[in-house]
Image (tube, helix red, strand yellow):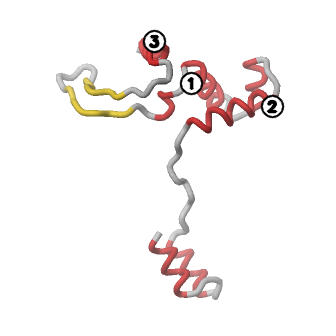
Amino acid sequence: MAKDWQELTKMTQGAPVVIERVRLVGKDIAIEGAFELPALANLSAEDQVFVAAFVRSHGSIKQMEQYFGVSYPTIKNRLNRIGGQLSFVDISVSEPSDDLLDRLERGELSVQETLEKLKK
């Protein structure tokens, strides 16, 4: 299955892909529609390997230098290039409402600021 995925990645050469049919393995169920691939699947096969190695190395650039035999700046540049190809969801952490209420009580936030933060 992984080999098939690599072949698909090579064949599409970075062109957008829409999956129109999905079949559950071992089940007699198929779903049809327009499904986009996850962002990581749109990377080249080489970049997918690079990202997998980065995750396996727990983000250690030193280990990545050893794996790929390249310098720190080369690893950083490649990470920046790959990161630029990925869209991310907003991962800003919102404060729990009890923390906001504590801050309001201490006078760190006004009632209006607290309400605005709660709306988010």
| Total number of numbered discs in the rendering | 3
Name the residue beneath numbered marker 2. 73
Name the residue beneath numbered marker 1. 48
Mark pair 1, 3: CA separation = 13 Å
Q: Is residue 116 left or right of residue 47?
A: left
Dot 2 amino acid type: Pro
In what element is the residue under mark 3?
Answer: helix
Mark found first going from the N terminus, 2 or 1: 1
- Numbered tag placed on residue 7 in the rendering: 3
- At 61% from the left and 83% from the top, the residue drawn is 109
Mark pair 3, 2: CA separation = 30 Å
Dots 3 and 2: beta carbons under 8 Å?
no
**Among the 4 quarters of the image, the one containing residue 79:** top right
Residue 4: x %, y % from top left:
42, 12
Vertical arrangement, residue 96 with respect to residue 112, above or below = above
Q: Nearer the viewer, residue 30 or 78?
A: 78
Dot 1 amino acid type: Gln
* Residue at the farthest left position: 28
Vertical arrangement, residue 65 with respect to residue 119, above or below = above
In what element is the residue under mark 2?
Answer: helix
Mark found first going from the N terminus, 3 or 2: 3
Mark found first going from the N terminus, 1 or 3: 3
- At 54% from the left and 54% from the top, the residue drawn is 91
Mark pair 2, 1: CA separation = 19 Å
How many neighbours does mark 1 have within 10 angstroms: few (below 14), some (14-19), or many (20 or more)? Answer: some
- At 68% from the left and 36% from the top, the residue drawn is 80
Dot 3 amino acid type: Glu
Q: Nearer the viewer, residue 38 or 64?
A: 38
Q: Is residue 78 left or right of residue 12?
A: right
